[in-house]
Amino acid sequence: MGRYIQLKQNGSMLIAIIIILPVFILIMTAFMQLNVSSYRVAKKDSLQTHAQFGADAAIDFALQEINEDGTWTGTVSPVEIHNDGNVRATYEAAITDSDSNNKVLTVTGRTYSPITHTAPDATVKLTVNLRAVKSGNYSIVTGVGGLFMSNTAKIVGGDVLVNGEVELKNTAQIGLTTNSVNVDVAHQTCPNPANATYPRICNPGENGEPIEIENSAHIYGSVKANNQTTTTGITNPGLIASSGVPAQSLPPYDRNAQKAAVVTTITGASASCSGSQTRTWTANTKITGDVTISNNCVVTVLGNVWITGSLEAKNLTKIQVSDTLGATQPVIMIDGAYAKFSNSSQLKSNSNDTGFQIITYKSNASCSPECTSLTGTDLYNSRNLTTIELNNSASGPDSIFYARWSRVTINNSGQIGAIVGQTIELKNSGTITFGTSVPGTGTTTWVINGYRRSFN
């Protein structure tokens, strides 16, 4: 009886082993398959990352090439960027012209593993829209106030003339490592505090140095600046000693001639529009009162316009130069408190790439807006009065924004032709490009205008 019980117990363990062993084998098989699958996914992700790096490298390489040679059309054959014996990565780049101001860059990054593979194991293709930025001598000209840049504001095209002082903060930047600019600073900010002799160029040791650079801000260019000895943050080639920069007057404009040429007078209300409306401002028009253009309204300008009040353009509106003007730049002269452009409003050039000149005459002097000259405390008190403001992707390629006695403030804006003002402030902007000289001859820099993944 005892022997029978023992045999029965032994048989029970054998049955248990027969049941558990297959289950264990199934679990181990599933675990091994999961590991293999995870390895494949990880390898695929790694190869995809290498292909992405290749495509990104192609963009950087293409921008360098196209800015050195405007006729460059792309790589002749795949360029190998990585090969460690296990993984090989290459890129290709091709450029096609859309028109004289736009190009399409197509880049492809590919990876091969093992390196003997002839067909890519991962591919990333990107389409990048490039925009031409035309710039020349002095795309920025300031008076005695100076140039103030902060956050990520950048000037990537055109040279800079500052009669006053320069202050760069955060990651603000003038010029590029591949595109140095000329910066001239006269240090015309004395005496301080201002009196009747203001402005004049400061003497050595008087009122500090004219250029102040904080954080990681930088100037890439040939910098001439009276009384400047600090070179931190100034390279390519950097500060030129004993510069001797003379103060220069801001560009003249014949205000009285434009006023005398007026043939049509309309009210600000009739010149304004909102919604999907259109307006036409004829040449030599005087607009009395404030003008507001909003919500997709389109205004076509046929010549010079004088506004006695303020001008505000917002919410996707367009003020466009008529093709009938050809290369003749119309002037919008504003006597009121401000000219504001915001929320993707545009000053649109015509087919000849002719933009506007927006010029404001408001000041804190008693003669405003009819002042023919300002000095002393009148000029000092007017230099920080903002009369031109661009916000939230407002743009004016080929247009000049000119605050005759006051300040221009650019905040998160798009492409701009040129800026002139007693004081200029650029802030909270990714990159601000300039396309018009004041005056001078132009060069072209290609910058990224759009970036998307292509699955073709």
Image: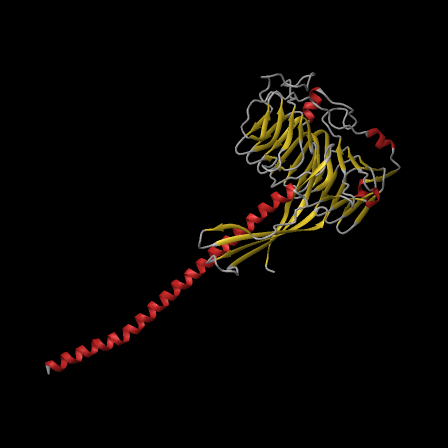
Give how far across and how far down residue 292 sits, in percent.
75, 42
Q: Quadrant of the N terminus?
A: bottom left
Q: Is residue 123 left or right of residue 390?
A: left
Please give left or right for residue 62 compared with residue 20 in the image. right
Tell me if I can see residue 342 in this picture.
Answer: no
Q: Is residue 220 above or below residue 367?
A: below
x, y percent for residue 244: 65, 20
**Front residue (pair 93, 448):** 93
Judged left or right of residue 441, residue 211 is left
Q: Is residue 284 visible?
A: yes
In the picture, residue 235 is in which quadrant?
Answer: top right
Q: Nearer the viewer, residue 40 or 79?
A: 79
Residue 70 drawn at (x, y percent): 67, 44
Occupied quadrant, residue 6: bottom left
Q: Residue at x 41, y 61 (%)?
A: 38
Q: How is the image coloured?
A: secondary structure
Residue 221 placed where, x, y %? 61, 31
Compared with 345, 375 (above or below) is: above
Question: Which of the image's four quarters has the C terminus?
Answer: bottom right
Residue 56 versus residue 4 in the image, above or below: above
